[in-house]
Amino acid sequence: MEETIKFLNNLLSSETIVVGLSGGPDSMCLLDILLKLNKNIKIICAHINHNIREESKDELKFIEEYTSKLDVILETVTFPKKSDSQNYNELELREMRYKYFKELIDKYNAKYLFTAHHGDDLIETILMRITRGSNLKGYSGFELITDKEDYKIIKPLIFTTKDEINKYLEVNNIPYVIDNTNNLDDYTRNRYRHNILPFLKEENKNVHLRYLKFSKELLNYYNYVDKILTDEVSKRYKDKILYLDKFDKLDEFMKQKIIEYILDDNYMDNLYLVSDIHVNNILNIINSNKPNIIINLPDNLKVIKEYNKVIFTKEDINNKSYKIELESNTLLPNNKRIKIVEYSSNTSNYCTRLDSKELKLPLYLRTKNNGDRMIIKNMNHSKKVKDIYIDSKLSKIDRDTQPILVDSDNNILWIPGIKKSKFDKEISEKYDIILEYID
C-alpha cells in the first residue's frame, strides 16, 4: 500500500478528480486513501447502477449514506434495461460506463479518472489474454496511467494485492458491500481468481510485482516497435484503408504487426475483443486470390478486401439501394452529382448525350437490380451490368451506390463514369440532353 500512497502523493496537488465508486472493497479502499492524502483535491464520486442485480438498489443507498458524511460530490446513474429484456454484454456496459465517466470529466473539468483495478486484476488480465491470444500490447494487461485526449485514467492500486486491500479495510474500519457474483465460477475471471492466483501467491507472495514488471517490459518493447511500425503504417494505411500494393512487399512479421496496429486503431480500448485468430483471418483474405471478400469481426467491424485495398468499416454496407428522379442538379448518395448542362466538350464516360425522342421520360438514377443488362455503345449485344462492374474493377462497396441512368421503361442509358450505352450520341449527332457526372 505504501507504493500506492507514494505514487498518489507525487501525482496530486490541487486537481479535480473523478473516482469510480462501486461500493465494493477495492473502490472503498481507494476513496479512503485519496481522502487521507491531505491534498487540496476536489473528489467527484461516480456510482453506476448497472440495473442487473437486485442488490444494486441497496448498494446505491449505502453509497449515498456513506458519501453524505464526507466532503465529496456524489454523481449517480442507473442504466436503463434493454427493451428486449436481455442483459447488456460486457462491451456495451464498458462503453456505457466510460461514456458516463467522460461526461463527468467534462462537467467538472476534471484532470483524472481513478479506477480501483489492483495488482491481482493485472495478473488475471494478463493470464486471460495469454490464454485467449492477443498482441504485445494486449499481453501487457493494463497500464498504471492511460492517456486520453483531455484527461488521464489512473489505476493507483496496481501496486497492491487484494489481500492488502482487505487488510487496509479491516484496520481502518471501512464499510463496503459485496457483489456475490464475484464468488461464482460461472465467470472466466473468477475461475482464474479462485484457482490460479492462490497457487501463484504460494510460489511468490509478491508475484503481483513480477507481473507488473512483466507488463512494463512488454509495454517498453511495444512502444519501441510502435515507433518503427507507425512509420511503415503511415505509408500504407489511411482513412481506414490498407493499400496492398505497398503492403505485399513487407516481410511476414511486419505484415502481422501492421494488421495488429490497424485493429488497435479500430478497437482502441476494446482491443480485448480481438485475438491473433482475427489477425490471421485478415492476412488470409489478403493472401487470397479472390479480389472481393468480406469478413465480420467483433463489434460490427467489417473487413472488406477490394482488389488492391482492404477497408475497415462499421458502416452498414447492405440495403443502400435507391431510385431518384433526375433533376437539373442531382445529388447522389455516393456524394457525387449528375448535372444537366447546356454544353460540354467532354467525350469520356463521365458525360453522355441523349436524344429525348428515343427515350421515355422522366429519367431516373438508381442502383443495380438483379439481371440488369445494357447494350454498350458500339456493341451489338447486351452485357450484364454485374460483369461490367467486375471488368471495371469496381469495388463491392462502390457497386452498392454506383448510379445507373434509366428511362421510365427501365432502359439502361448510362453507367456514369464507367460505360456509355447505345443511346449515347456523338458531338456531331442530334441530341437535346447533356449530362455530366461530377465528383
Image (cartoon, rainbow, N blue to C red):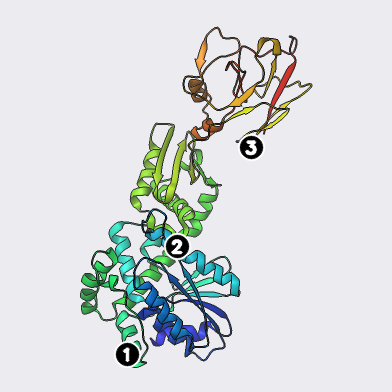
Under mark 2, the amino acid is: Pro
Badge 3 vs badge 2, beta-carbon distance below 8 Å: no
Q: Amino acid at mark 3?
A: Asn
Looking at the rendered structure, the secondary structure element under dot 3 is loop
Mark 1 vs mark 3, CA separation in Å: 64 Å
Residue 344 x/y as whole percent: 76, 22
Quick one: label 2, few (<14), some, or many (20+) residues within 10 Å? few
Q: Residue at x 60, y 36 (%)?
A: 334
Question: Pointers 2 and 1 in contact (CB under 8 A)?
Answer: no
Precedes in sequence: disc 2 or disc 1:
2
The residue that disc 3 covers is 335
Q: Is residue 391 visible?
A: yes
Q: Is residue 346 above or below residue 430?
A: below
* Chain-order first, disc 3 or disc 2: 2
Q: Quadrant of the C terminus?
A: top right
Q: Which residue is more in the foreground, 179 or 256?
A: 179
Give the quadrant of the N terminus.
Answer: bottom left
Q: Position of residue 168 (x, y in %)?
A: 35, 88
What residue is shown at x 37% (from left), y 72% (from top)?
A: 56
Residue lying at 50% horizontally and 24% vertically, measured from the top left = 369
The residue identified by callout 2 is 80
Quarter occupied by residue 289: top left
Counting from the top left corner in percent of width and height, residue 251 is at 41, 46
Query: Nearest the camera: 405 or 40?
Result: 405
Residue placed under numbered mark 1 in the picture: 170
Type of residue at label 1?
A: Glu
Mark nearer the viewer, 3 or 2: 2
The disc label shown at residue 178, or none: none
* Residue 89, quarter of picture: bottom left
Quadrant hosting residue 21: bottom left
